């Protein structure tokens, strides 16, 4: 190595040393907690876990995922309280039910913990609880957009298969769809439960009792996968208009085969990844986006499946 090259390498090392030291200092003790409303059985949230894992690795911070095992929202409220009491640098949380969760979230903010709302809730609700911002898909708006699209495709009646009916945001999806069609929701939304066999049976029973139903709307893989099996069993697969929220392996297969017309992609990876990055940079440098971030809705059809098919259930 020439003398000049040695000097350049030494200069580069000296210049980089403060940056490396600063990065190590930032990583020391920085902890964020993401609290979701999802039960352990909901595999859709694996993408959320992948998002926070990658963001934590890239930003050099510790991010922990917590949730109520059965999806009980009162349990989730307690988890938020416990998370705030543990003194994290910040909490990232869903706002699945404003009445149940707004109190613990406001208390966390009042105690000095920064909060970002993700996935469920609305930008207005995020502001009301004192959160820094909202990252997600307004559920009613997504349902409305889907209903308008379906109306343009000739749909006039539908079955909404709601596998998490206790969550108000899931009902907003069904209501938005009905409003987009310009019809009453009425009894077109069923409480499907979360057991795959029961979901399948309830879909079969509804369609048997209402054979003129134009469309089926499911709210995620938990309800979409058993509905696919139901439609295969009763011979309606490919004949009835089928749209769904969210993506997953079986949903992607259904879109590719033409059984599902579209999936509404709210990009859960971004819902998890972006809050970690935003909050970390806010704490380190005092920078914060001026607006909330809508991660969806986007409609995925058979024409745009290349990357989605490759990463469905992992990053998409």
Image (cartoon, grey):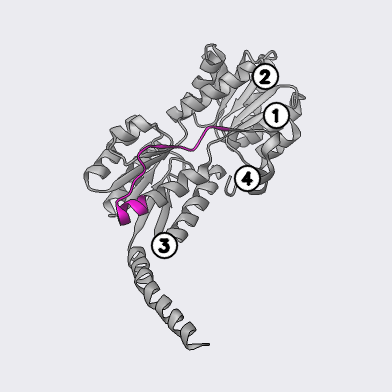
**Which of disc 4 and disc 2 is earlier in sequence?**
2
**Which badge, 4 or 3, comes first in the chain's sequence?**
3
Answer few, some or many: residues within 10 Å of disc 3's Cα (few below 14, many 20 plus, some between 14 and 19): some
Residue located 57% across and 24% down the image: 146
Q: Nearer the viewer, residue 84 or 154?
A: 154
Q: Which residues are magenta?
A: 279-298
Q: Residue 230 versus residue 30: which sits nearer the camera?
A: 30
Q: In this rendering, does residue 264 appear at all?
A: yes
Q: Nearer the viewer, mark 2 or mark 4?
A: 4
C-alpha span from label 2 to label 1: 10 Å
Look at the numbered disc 3 and give the secondary structure of its residue.
loop
Horizontal relation, residue 63 to residue 106: left or right: right
Q: Are marks 2 and 1 in contact (CB under 8 Å)?
A: yes
Task: Tell me the distance, in whole angstroms, between the alpha carbons under discs 1 and 4.
Answer: 22 Å
Residue that badge 3 annotates: 60
SS at mark 1 in the image? helix
Q: Residues within 10 Å of mark 4 (few under 14, many from 20)?
A: some
Give me the disc on residue 312: 4
The answer to whether residue 174 shows anywhere in this view is no
Q: Where does label 1 land, which residue?
A: 230
Disc 1 from disc 3: Cα separation:
46 Å
Chain-order first, disc 1 or disc 4: 1
| Residue 60 on the magenta span | no
Q: Is residue 228 above or below residue 281?
A: above
Residue 193 is situated, as x and y percent measured from the top left of the image, at 54, 31
- Residue 207, which numbered label? 2
Image spot of residue 148 (x, y percent) = 57, 19
Where, by quadrant of the figure, is residue 251 drawn?
Answer: top right
């Amino acid at each position: 190595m020439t003398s000049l090259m040695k000097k350049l390498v030494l200069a580069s090392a000296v210049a980089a040393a403060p940056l490396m030291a600063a990065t190590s200092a930032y990583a020391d003790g920085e902890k964020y907690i993401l609290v979701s409303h999802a039960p352990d059985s909901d595999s859709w949230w694996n993408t959320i876990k992948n998002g926070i894992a990658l963001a934590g690795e890239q930003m050099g911070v510790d991010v922990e995922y917590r949730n109520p095992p059965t999806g009980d929202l009162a349990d989730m409220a307690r988890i938020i309280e416990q998370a705030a009491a543990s003194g994290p640098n910040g909490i990232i949380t869903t706002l699945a039910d404003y009445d149940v969760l707004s109190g613990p979230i406001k208390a966390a903010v009042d105690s000095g913990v920064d909060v970002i709302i993700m996935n469920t809730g609305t930008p207005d609700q995020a502001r009301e609880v004192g959160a820094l911002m909202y990252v997600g898909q307004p559920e009613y708006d997504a349902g409305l957009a889907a209903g308008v699209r379906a109306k343009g495709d000739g749909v006039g009646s539908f079955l909404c298969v709601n596998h998490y009916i206790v969550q108000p945001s899931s009902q907003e999806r069904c209501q938005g769809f009905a409003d987009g069609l310009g019809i009453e929701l009425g009894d077109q939304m069923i409480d499907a439960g979360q057991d795959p066999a029961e979901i399948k049976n309830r879909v079969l029973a509804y369609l048997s009792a209402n054979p003129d139903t134009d469309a089926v709307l499911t709210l995620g893989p938990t309800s979409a996968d058993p509905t696919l099996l139901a439609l295969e069993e009763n011979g309606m697969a490919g004949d009835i208009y089928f749209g769904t929220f969210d993506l997953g392996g079986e949903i992607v297969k259904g879109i590719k085969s033409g059984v599902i017309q579209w999936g509404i992609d709210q990009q859960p990876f971004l819902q998890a990844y972006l809050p970690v990055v935003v909050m970390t940079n806010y704490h380190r440098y005092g920078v914060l986006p001026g607006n909330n971030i809508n991660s969806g809705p986007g409609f995925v059809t058979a024409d745009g499946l290349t990357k989605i098919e490759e990463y469905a259930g992992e990053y998409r």
